[in-house]
Amino acid sequence: MKSKVIAVIPARKEGDGIKQRNILPFCGKPVIAYSIQAALQSGIFDRVIVSTDSSEIAKVALEYGAEVPFLRNTGIESQKESIDDVLIHSISVLNKDSDDYDFICCIYPVAPFVSKQIIVSTYNILIESDAEGIIPVIPNPYPTQRSLFINPNGYIDYKWPDYKKTHSKQIEVLYRDAGQHFFIKTEALLRENKSLTKRIIPYLINSVEHQDMVSPFDWKVAEYKYNLLRDISLREAVYEDVEVLFKWRNDIETRENSFEKGELNYNDHVKWFKKMLLRDDVIIFVLMVGGIPVGEARINIESNEYMVSYMIDSEYRSRGYGTVLLKMVENSLVEKYGNIWMVAEVLEHNIKSRRVFLSLGYEEIEERDRFVYRKHAMFYDDIIMG
């Protein structure tokens, strides 16, 4: 039986730092619209509601497709009201008129970097695990254990002197909540009266996909990062890509999903890559995001069949870049070669890639330990990230 899932976007009138920041313009539309649209586009929620105490925020939320079934009144002073209070209140109100929900997803109203791809990815990871919830986190850029503080005499000192001479790489990495969204089993939330139970798993994102937005300067930085992530282009590989491709090909997950699972020798990789660049029947594409290489696709041409394989940098997986890469590759091939067949082979256990090819309209054929995918290449007019 399909689980019932609800998204709750908590948006109070009194924001932190910037007045009315939940509905301030961000790259051309109210910032809360990004959270609403990502939730709706994900296609996994039975309902997407905004819990707010503001009729002005409610009006904006309704305009962008969310429900506002009530104006929030938890009985708790707004500045002392926690996210958990809001979620529990929402569930208690909604369950008077509807069935229980299996999962609740809290999506913050000022979270323009949350996307349908990230929401779907975190949900899929959660339901395939035995955890009670999942939350995106980012690593602290500098070891917290080596923090400085100002002592009572006004001088700088180490907060934890034991770490003074410890090399940064030897110190445990600590993480922080990315402040975008999280999923929690409703039963666990109501049982513990909190969303951060003992069985919450992390979902790592990188610093480009995150920005605190509590000051006007933060806001401008966030807009710059947002536009940077949508600066997407495709180019053919050059010799200077040899290092990054070696790193990607030796990644553990990449090797697990490859037909050749052994660890690559660097010198052998360099020789292979040089040969590939010179071959007329091989094309290697590199996907660029904000000027940074994030993925590669290799095409082996055999008559009218174009065999495609691809890989994405581990820091950018589950963001939808695999789909974007393959769409852009098809566009490039159609423009150059016209009517061609695209073919791919994927190992049975590689669920992520199988989903990508199916979403792009490939026919799936099962063969022993793998699946073969085939389709006529097509041209995509719209390759905008969700």
Image: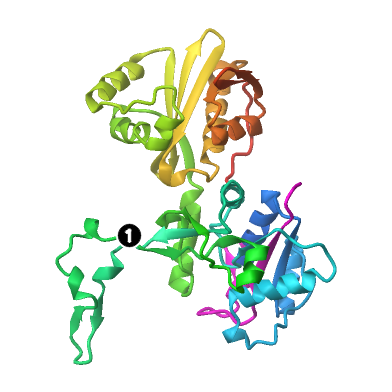
Q: Which corner quadrant of the image does residue 281 belong to?
A: top left
Does 13 lie within the magenta span?
A: yes
User: Is residue 97 depicted above or below 132 in this figure?
Assistant: below
Q: Nearer the viewer, residue 275 or 252?
A: 252
Q: Nearer the viewer, residue 347 or 113?
A: 347
Residue furthest out toward the bottom: 153
Visible residue check, residue 286:
no
Visible residue check, residue 268:
yes
Q: Position of residue 337 (x, y in %)?
A: 55, 16
Does 20 lie within the magenta span?
A: yes
Q: Secondary structure at mark 1?
A: loop
Q: Which corner quadrant of the image does residue 163 belong to?
A: bottom left
Give the residue drawn at x 78%, y 75%.
70
Q: Position of residue 384 (x, y in %)?
A: 59, 44
Of the residues shown, which amino acid type is indicated by label 1?
A: Val
Residue furthest out toward the right: 97
Q: Which corner quadrant of the image does residue 348 belong to?
A: top right
- Residue that mark 1 sits on: 173
Q: Position of residue 362 (x, y in %)?
A: 65, 25
Q: Nearer the viewer, residue 216 or 58?
A: 58
Q: Which residues are magenta?
A: 1-29
